[in-house]
Amino acid sequence: MDLDTPLEQLNWIPRPRILPLRRLALVTVGDLLTHYPRRHEDRREFSGFPGEESITPLCLCGEVVKTRLMRFGGRKIFEAVLEENGGNALSQPLICRWFNLHYIQKMIATGQRLVVFGRVKRKGPRLLMDHPEFEIIENDEEILVHFRRIAPIYPATEGLSQRVLRGLIFRLLEQVQDASANVALPVSLVHGEHENALRKIHFPESEQQLRRVRDHLVLTEFFRMQMQIAAARAENSARIGWRHRTSGRLVDKFLRALPFALTDAQRRVLNEIKNDLQIASPMNRLLQGDVGSGKTVVAIAAMLQAVESGSQAALMAPTQILAEQHYAVLRDWLDPLGIRIALRTAARQEDNAALPLFERAETNTRDGCASQIECSCPDQSESAPQIIVGTHALLYENVKFSNLGLAVIDEQHKFGVAQRAKLTSREPAPDVLVMTATPIPRTLTMTIYGDLELSTIDEMPRGRSEIVTHLLTGKKLDEPITFLREQLSAGRQAYIIYPLIDESEKLDAKAAAAEFARWEERLRPFRCELLHGRVASPDKQSIMERFRTGQTHALISTTVIEVGIDISNATVMLIENAERFGLSQLHQLRGRIGRGTHVSHCWLITSDKSMETVTKLSVLQRTTNGFEIAEADWELRGPGDLLGTAQSGLPVLKLGDLRRDAALMRKARLAALELLENDPELEQPENQRFRDLIVEKQGQTFSHIS
């Protein structure tokens, strides 16, 4: 039997267990053995029952001495009274309660021994544990599998209790000859507990052994991931790309015409990009910077370097509104330079008129191809657009690139891997610059963005106005409405944001369409308009144009305005049901204000007064630094929402935690980079075992961009 053996072939696994195993995506022996415990319970010796409440969950064992079913206001409450094992007369009984779970009554009976896990709380004289995890201890021949040891507790499903899962895995480990991890590690990463690692992670002999073997298995996961990332970097570097060697006069002319000077951070990042564009290997760079830090200006300068070298540049944005705004900005700044710009979206196609070209300059594009600003290569016509701005429409067949040399992807996390690859997988390989205004926690730059070079604009331009953030818990809007009317009377404009378009029976949240009429009444005589994702594209364009020109005073909207909208007179934002948004998304939304000279105000409205919500939203009151907010979001939400391994194409982490195990990730990354640097083809005998880690397998893509 090996790790690829289907569980269906094991005749000792009862057939009724196969379906719930499949629900957990456990199909092979390897799947089941790497179904790691989510925690362990030390059942070698139980603590006595506590006399007071507990701050953290406890694992306790006792005997059921009484059960009863009660009804209160339509709710059914089942109680099981536990006394401490050993008959300690001084200990107080523990009452375990389950609400509206009628099947529990059929499972628990007087005289049984239960192991329960949960937080103890006091209510009057009684000690209670509500909805504890529990397991019935039976005196059978398998008692040593479940009791008197450090016992694993697994993610489970209906039809697979902890006892069943634990028993299946215990028996499987007895039959698998090599219970080590199925990923080899280089010598530099091996440090004890690598033998029988899978047995030890399920059934450790001590807490110390559990910590050591977990570190070993986490390293195997991280090393597999980092080998794939390192291989993707190497693969991209080996592609034939463009050499955008230019005099730099076009970029210099653009920068001199700007009404402001670049910050030191912008100049540093632009130099990094310029250097990448001049070498033969395709650039694959991530540009991150806080909301309003000036990424777009840097991207335009990069596109002008590509244009001056004779190639085309593409700028892909995630929404129609943002694409049209980029197009308007590029027209405003680049029409005087004679750059031909085209807009390609599903709803709108437009080219600027032919303009006198910027002075021609002899340059090199692909090796051996001399060019001017209008490339003299046969595949570049005199009228072809030099910069094409668009949405996903750029991916379709009717958008033709004659010689795409640079692809800029804005708000890259909005696009899937396959979509980015369709734009960039052509020969010669275009340089790729992906931008994000959502700062990325440091550990993630080693994982899903690990095949990209990283540039960070960590300095804000001078003259940006202050944003004051107000947190309002409750349903009364009197104060923000009064403030809104004062600001609109002073000539300012406002955004009012909702999480939903229409009201939902399933979600307790307000909706933009339902609240629009109320805001018209509240703010009369000021003009309000409604904007959301289902508004037809021509209407969206008209609504945004009226707001941009000040004809509309308040925009009631969903998150369709989350990125890229730049209206300096909009100084107030009110976000309803703020608890329904992540911190990074709230920061993005807030970034739509504070773009002019007036002090801006963001009101976060929530009726959820829980400590969790107040703690989260208070982060935005405390800071406007996107990097601090990203780290706080990472801490509060965990890596699951941020990582998006389905988007990245990387294998899912079953055990590793990117926050907790950041040091192990750094070790795995250094080991993978060193290995491939010293032996790129993995030809040395001791390294050939790692080849399977970087071979593309079905359903996996190891390069995020190219």
Image (cartoon, rainbow, N blue to C red):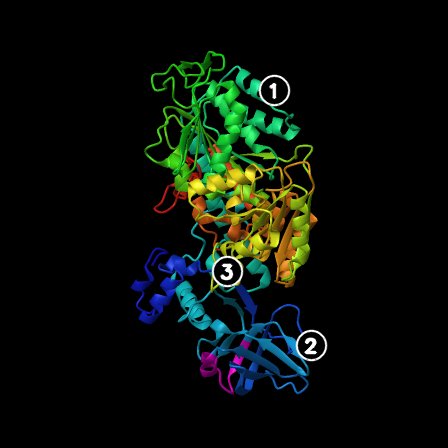
The three-letter code of the residue at mark 2 reads Glu
Horizontal and vertical percent position of residue 54: 66, 72
Vertical comparison of 109 with 606: above or below: below
Distance Cα–Cα, label 3 vs label 2: 33 Å
In the picture, the disc for residue 201 is: 3
Q: Which residue is mark 2?
A: 52
Q: Secondary structure at mark 3?
A: helix
Q: Residue 428 or 528: which is nearer the viewer? A: 528
Q: Residue at x 30, y 68 (%)?
A: 11
Q: Residue 267 or 125: which is nearer the viewer? A: 267
The answer to whether residue 114 is magenta is yes
Horizontal and vertical percent position of residue 474: 64, 62
Image quadrant of residue 90? bottom right
Q: Which stretch is magenta?
A: 102-115
Sequence order check: which comes first, mark 3 or mark 2? 2
For the question of whether residue 449 can be seen, the reply is no
Horizontal and vertical percent position of residue 421: 40, 37
Q: Which residue is mark 1?
A: 256
Q: Secondary structure at mark 2?
A: loop
Q: Residues within 10 Å of mark 1 (few under 14, many from 20)?
A: few
